[in-house]
Amino acid sequence: MAKIDNHPTTNSTGKEKLQFAIGIKVKLIIGFAIPLVFTIVVGMVAYSLAASGMTKNYEDSMSKAMSMAIEYLDFGFGSAVSESEQLYYDTDLMRWATGAIYNEWTRKEIMEDVSLDLNIKQGGNEFVANMYIIPGSSSQVISTNDDNAVVPGFYEELADKDEAVCLQTLDGSWVGAHNYIDQVLSQHYKGYSADDYACSYIRPMATKRACIVVDYSSDSIAGVLQNLGLGENSIAAFVTADGRELLLKEGVISNSGDFSFVNQSYYTEAMADNAATIIDYVTYNHRQYLFMVSKSYQNGSAICAMVPVSLVNESADSIKNVTVLMVIISWLIAIVAGVLITIGITATIRQISSKLETVSGGDLTVSMRGRTDEFKLLVRSIVNMIKNSRDLIVQVLKTTENVSASTVNLSEASGVLTNSSNQISAAVDEMDQGLNRQAEDAQNCLMQMDELSQRITRAVETVQRMGSITDNTKDVIASGMSTMDDLTDKSAATTDITKNVTTNIKNLEESLSEIEKFVETIDNIANETSLLSLNASIEAARAGEAGRGFAVVAQSVSSLSDGTIEAARQIQSVMEQIKGYANDTVQVASQAEMIVSNQSETVNNTIQVFHDMNEYLQNLIDEISSLNQIIESMERHRNDTLAAIESISSVSEETAASVSTVNDSLKEQMTMMDNLNRSTIELQDRAKELTQAVNAFKI
C-alpha cells in the first residue's frame, strides 16, 4: 500500500520541482532585468536632458556671439559714418569740390591735406578698406589707394548709374556694391578688385558736386565670421540689405558659391521678422542645421550662420555611446551572475526535495547535512519539522487511545442530554401558546384604546373650535360695546345741539319782539311824517306861488311816508310768519329733545345688556378653558396608556419570538444531538483508522 501511494507522489514532486526551478530562473532574470531597464531609462533621460541642455547652451552662446559680432560691426559702421560727417562739414573740401578755389597751389594743398586725413582715418579703422572723394570732372579723385594714379573726377556720370540712388539724400546710403565706381577705378588702379570690400557707404557733399565713398574691408568682416568658431561643415555669411553676400563655407571666404542665404525662404522669413536675433532649425541637403540670424541696426545688413545639429549634439552623443556601452556590460554581468546563482540554488533545492520525498513516504528517520550559506536556516527548519512531526505522531498515538475512551462516555452523555432536551421542548411549546394568546389580547386592547383615542381627539378638536367661536363672540361683543359707547357720545352731542337750537329759537323770539317795537316806532314816525306833510301842503297852498316848491317837497315827503307805512306793514306781516315758524320749531325741538333723551336711556340699557353678555361669555370661556385642560390631561394619559399597551404588546411579541427562537434552537439542538450521536459513533471508527494510519510511520 505504501509503495502504491509513493509512486504518484514522486512524479508530482518532480514536475513541481522542475516548475519551481524554471520560476526561480525567470524571477532572477526579471529581478536583474528591472534595474537594468531602469538604467537604460535613466541613460535615455540623461541623454535627452544633456542634449536639450547642451543645445540650449549652444543656442544661447551662439546667439550672444552673433549679437556681439553684429554689435562690433555696427560700431565699425558707426565710426565710419562719423568720419564721413567730418569730411562732409570740411569747408575747404566743399570749396574745392565746387571749384570755388582757382589758385592751383591752394587746390593742391587742400588735396594733400584731405588725402592725409583720409589715410589717417583709414589707418585708424580696421573695417575701412578704402575711402574716396569723387568730385566733378574739373577735379581729380582723392583716395587712400596706394597706387598714385591720377583719376579724373566723374561725379556727373553717376547721375544715370545705380549709384545715383545713394546721391538723392544728404544723409548717405549703404550699398553692397558700386559697380560703375568699380569699373572706373579698376581702369586706373592696378590690382583694384570689388572683392576687397563687403559693403560701402556713399554720401553726397552738401553742394552735391562731390560724394564721399567708404568701402568696408571684406577681410575684416571675414575675420569676424571666422572668429564665431562655428565648427566643421558650418556655413556663415555677411549679407547686406540689398542682397550682396560674403560667404564663409568650410573655412573659405567667397562672394559667390553653390549656396546663398538670400535664396532661402527661411532667410526671407527671418529678415521679415522684427526680432534682432532669430534662431530656427532648417533642413539643407537632407541634413538638419541650426539656423541663426543677427541683424544690424546701422545699415540693415545681417550675419547668418548654419551649424549642423550633429555638431551641436556631439557631446550628448558621446554620453549616449558611453551609456549604451555600460548598459551592455551590465547586462552581460547580470546574465552570468544570474545563471551561476540559479545553478547553485537549483542543486540545493533538488537535494532538499529528495529528502522531503523520503519524509513524505512516512520515513521520519531522515537526517540532513548542515550548510553554511543562506539555506542553513531552511535545512534547520526542515530538521526541526521532521523532529516535531515525529513527536506529533507519538502524541497522536497517545491521544487516539484517549479519544477512543472518551467517545464511549460522550455517547452515554448525549443520550441523557437528548431526554432533557425533549422535556424542555414540551415546556417551551406550552409557554409559546400562552404568550401568543397574551399577544392577541394586548393587540385587541390596543385597538380599543386607539378607537377611544380617536374619539378624545375629536372632542379636543370640538372644544378647540368652541373656544375659537367664543373668542370671536367676545371680540364681536367688545366691538358692539365700543360702537354703543360711540352712539352714547353722539346722542349726548345731539341732545346738546337740540338744547342749543331751542335756546337760539327763544332768543330769536326775543329778537322778533324787539323788531316789532322798532316797526311800531317806524309806523308812528311815518304817521307823524304824514301829518307834517299835510300841514306843509296846507301852508304851501296858503303861500301861493311862493310856496309851490315847498309843496313839491311836502308831496315827496308824503309819498315817502306812505311807502314807509306800507313797508312797516309788510315787515309786520313777515315777522308774524317768522314768529309762527319759531313757535313750530320750538315745539319740534322740544319733541326731538325728548326723543334723544329716551334714546340715550335706551343706549345705556343696551350697554348694560352687552356688559352682562360679556360677563356670561367670560364665564363660558373660563369653563371651556377648564374643559380643554381636562381633555389635554386625558390626551396625555391616553398617550401614556397607548405607549404602555404598545410596550406590553411589543414585549409579548418579543417574548413570543424569543420562545419561538428557543423552541427552534431546542429542535436544532435535538437534531445536533442526533448528529452528535452519529458523529460519536463515526469518531470511534475514525479513531481506529487513525491508529492504523499512525502505525504506518517509522519513528
Image (cartoon, rainbow, N blue to C red):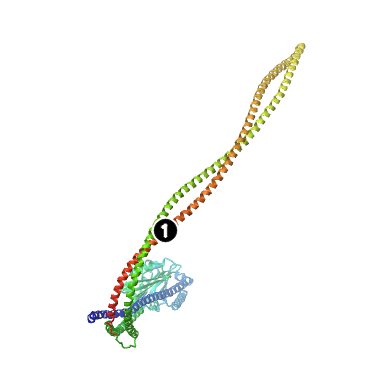
Q: Residue at x 45, y 55 (%)?
A: 645
Q: Is residue 443 visible?
A: yes
Q: Quadrant of the C terminus?
A: bottom left
Image height of 173 relative to 43, above or below: above
Question: From the viewer's perspective, is residue 48 above or below residue 488?
Answer: below
Q: Quadrant of residue 608?
A: top right
* Image quarter in which the N terminus is found: bottom left
Q: Nearer the viewer, residue 242 or 303?
A: 303
**In this picture, residue 284 sits left or right of residue 464:** left
Q: Horizontal and vertical percent for residue 211?
A: 42, 70
Q: Nearer the viewer, residue 134 or 287?
A: 287
Pointer 1 residue: 652
Q: Is residue 690 left or right of residue 439?
A: left
Residue 357, given in percent of the width and then of the height, sits at 27, 83
SS state under label 1: helix
Determine whether 426 is above or below 342 in the image: above
Looking at the rendering, which quadrant does residue 74 occupy? bottom left
Q: Position of residue 389 (x, y in %)?
A: 32, 82
- The x and y percentages for residue 411 are 32, 72
Task: In the rendered view, tell whether residue 213 sits above or below residue 389.
Answer: above
**Number of other residues with Cα within 10 Å of mark 1, as a class: few under 14, some 14 to 19, many 20 or more:** many
Quadrant position of residue 417: bottom left
